[in-house]
Structure formats: structure tokens, C-alpha cells
Image (cartoon, helix red, strand yellow):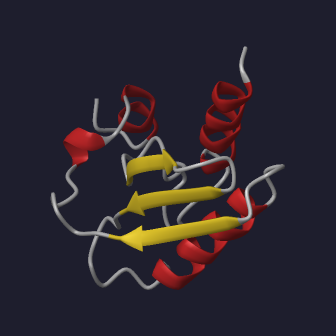
Amino acid sequence: MNEFLQKEEKIVELLKTVFDPEIPVNIYDLGLIYRIELKDEHTLDIDMTLTAPSCPAADFLVEDVKQKMSSIDGVETVNVNLVFEPEWSKDMMSEEAKLELGFM
């Protein structure tokens, strides 16, 4: 497996360790991650949203993502952009998240 794919795999693995304190499902499976772009070997851009624009855990979640992404070897710059288009909905959750939260 090439280095780029290994980094992408590690990014997803670490995103699955970030949890909203009020929801027992990680932000990746919740569908809160809209875009992951490894621009070059050292710069990572992530677009993410929140389940609600007024989420009280927003700062905590963004900081947790930045901190965990910065721990990946070679990643020097992490840009986390909060976006609200398209608006998040339950349809964006993985099947596992829907099961966990009782939506199936």
C-alpha cells in the first residue's frame, strides 16, 4: 500500500475516535465529515459540519480533530473548516450509526 493511502486510512481511523460528548457515535460515522483532502504530504484540509449550528461542543470537536490529525507522521498543517452546506441530516449517518442510535 502506498504512503498516501496509508495516511488516508490513518486519518479515517483517527476521525473515528472523535466523539461529540452528547452522542455515543463518532463524527465520521455520524456523517459530519464532508471532505478530507491531503493537499501535499504535509497539509491536510478537512470540511466538517455539526449536527446543529449551535452545537455547544463545536470548539471541542474542532480542536480534537486538529490534535488527532496533527499526530499523523508528516502532517504539519491541519485546517478544519466548519461548513453548514449541505445541511446535515440523519441520512448522512452510516448504517452502524443509525443502528447504534436506534434509527433502524
Q: Is residue 21 visible?
A: no
Q: Position of residue 65 (x, y in %)?
A: 61, 64
Determine which quarter of the picture holds residue 96.
Answer: top left
- In the image, is 36 to the left or to the right of 64? left
Q: Residue furthest top?
A: 1
Q: Residue furthest front?
A: 40
Q: Is residue 93 visible?
A: yes
Instruction: State the quadrant of the C terminus.
Output: top left
Q: Residue at x 71, y 38 (%)?
A: 10
**Residue 54 versus residue 64: which sits nearer the camera?**
64
Determine which quarter of the picture holds residue 56.
Answer: bottom left
Q: Is residue 56 above or below residue 11?
A: below
**Residue 74 versus residue 9: which sits nearer the camera?**
74
**Residue 96 versus residue 1: which sits nearer the camera?**
1
- In the image, is 103 to the left or to the right of 16? left
Q: Position of residue 90 (x, y in %)?
A: 23, 47
Q: Residue at x 38, y 33 (%)?
A: 94
Q: Residue at x 40, y 31 (%)?
A: 99
Q: Position of residue 60 (x, y in %)?
A: 59, 79
Instruction: State the quadrant of the N terminus.
Output: top right
Q: Is residue 29 above or below residue 45?
A: above
- In the image, is 75 to the left or to the right of 11? right
Q: Residue furthest left?
A: 86
Q: Residue at x 39, y 61 (%)?
A: 48
Q: Is residue 101 above or below residue 99?
A: below
- In the image, is 33 to the left or to the right of 15? left
How many marks the image carries: the answer is 0
